[in-house]
Every structure is written in C-alpha cells, then in structure tokens.
Amino acid sequence: MTQVTESLTVLEAVGVYAGSLRPKDGEQTEAHKQLLRFVSWCGSERRISEIAPSEIGEYSDQSNGGTQSAERLQEVKKFLAFASKQGLTEHNLARHLRIRKARSRAKLSGEDERRATVIELTPEGHENLAAELEDLKAQRGPIAAQIRSAAADKDVRENVPLEAAREHLGQVESRILEIENTLTAAVVVDPSARKRSIIQVGSRVWLKDLSSGRETQYTVVSASEAKPLEGKVSDESPVGKAVIQRREGDEVQVQTPRGSVKYSILKVS
C-alpha cells in the first residue's frame, strides 16, 4: 500500500473512494459534488499523502457556517477516514476536520445565492447525458482496481500501467463533474410546447446562403449536445447566435472562418 500512498493524487483518491461506494439513489451524485469541492481546494494534481493536518483544520475554518457546509464537511470526513484506513495518508486527517453547527442564516443564504447558468437541453440530449453519466460512474470501480493492481509493482517510477490508469481515472472524474454540473443547471425544453415560429433550443432550421444559393438544415441545441457533423449546432456557435430568437423569413449575418455569410431563414419547426 506504500506505493499507492506515494502515487495517488487527491482527485485519484476521490475516484478510488467513489468506486467503493454503493449509496442509495441520488446520494452518490451529491457526495461526489461535495468531494470535488475539496479536490478543487486542495489541488487535483496534489498528492494526498502531502496533505497536512493543519490544512484540514484550515479547510474546516473556511467551510464552516451553514447547513450545506456541515453536509459538505461530513462527506469530506468520510473520505478522509477511508483514505486513512486504506493507508493513503500517514495521519487520520478526518480527526482534524472540525464541523460546527450553522452560525446564522445570513451565511447560509450567502452560500445559496451562487447563481448557476441555466442550460437548456432537448429531451434527447438530457437522456444521452444521463446515460453517459451512469456509464462513467460504472467505470470507477474497475479503474480503481487497475490502480491498486498497478501500484503493487514496486518500481512506480517506470510504471506505465499505473500512469495510464491514473490518467484514465482523471479523465473520467473530470467528465463526470462536467456532466453533473450540466444536468444540475439543465432545463429540459419541450419543443412541442414552444412557439414554432421563433427559433429556440430544440428548433430545426432551414437556411439559404444568399450568395451561393446553397441550402442547409440545422437543429439548434445546447453546447453539450452539439454535433456539427450531424447537423446539431450549439446556440453559442456563430450560426446558433445569429438565428436564436429569429423567425422564418428573417435574414441573418453569420461570421464564419471564410468571412461573413448572409442567410435567409427558409423554415422553422
């Protein structure tokens, strides 16, 4: 286990811990969010064996002050206890995590007032992201096992399998965080309940290049759903920005790598 202690970063250790959990519905997502806050504070690439007890105390002092803070610290405390039990840290850092009762509503509201950007998703896009998230979470356990197996090799300096497994886990955890943040801020749009005459996320649009006469068809989606080769353009792309909230018959100017192109909106559905 000494090799694991010397090799795992904070993010990787969280990945190993998450892979060992079998929580009830909804619990894993929330626990993961709280732990990733801790990862961000420590630094994802930092070795967990380098974290000092005094730093955990400092994290406690900065995080205490509300019901949400207490819940967050409880999740971190469970993780630190796991890390100690697995030999990932020299000290049981969980003992240095002080959790105080909520001080005041004012501090709680300050934590709650962080506004998340609303992301509009089509029903298909939401379903695809949710399925991808479940698939990624299922990969945690096997990757954690790969890390433990590779770390058993005493020569960690030239341990290619260990480095590959660590990199894979980092990529998986990063994508999980990205999807969870997207789904948390997401609003699923119902194309059938919207005014079809106005272009919004989920609208299908037919455009005509007024210079060449070429006609193209796009579906406007969120950035997380964009697949240009399949005709799905982001509402943040040049075409998406130009047509959003416009109507059939409007003419729009789009800035492209080959210059400015003028389109006529032929049809919206």
Image (cartoon, grey):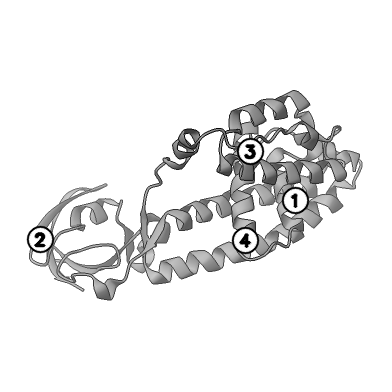
Structural distance between the alpha carbons of marks 3 and 1? 14 Å
The N terminus - image quarter: top right
Residue at the image position 75 percent from the left and 29 percent from the top: 51
Residue pictured at 13% horizontal, 65% vertical: 265
Task: Identify residue type, mark 1.
Answer: Tyr
Q: Secondary structure at mark 2?
A: loop
Q: CA distance from mark 4 to mark 1?
A: 15 Å
Vertical placement of residue 238 versus 246, above or below: above
Which amino acid type corresponds to the residue marked 4 in the rendered image?
Leu
- Category of crowding for the residue at label 4, using alpha-carbon neighbours closer than 10 angstroms: few (below 14), some (14–19), many (at least 20): some
Circle 4 SS class: helix
Left or right: residue 155 versus residue 53 is: right
Please report whichever mark, 3 or 1, sits nearer to the chain's N-terminal start: 1
Real-space Cα distance between discs 1 and 2?
A: 57 Å
* Residue hosting label 3: 38
Q: Which residue position holds label 2?
A: 210
> Disc 3 or 2, which lies upstream in sequence?
3
Question: Percent position (x, y) of residue 151?
Answer: 85, 46
Picture quadrant where residue 157 is located: top right
Residue 255 in sight in this render: yes
Q: Are marks 3 and 1 in contact (CB under 8 Å)?
A: no
Q: Position of residue 93 (x, y in %)?
A: 79, 34
Q: Which residue is mark 1?
A: 17
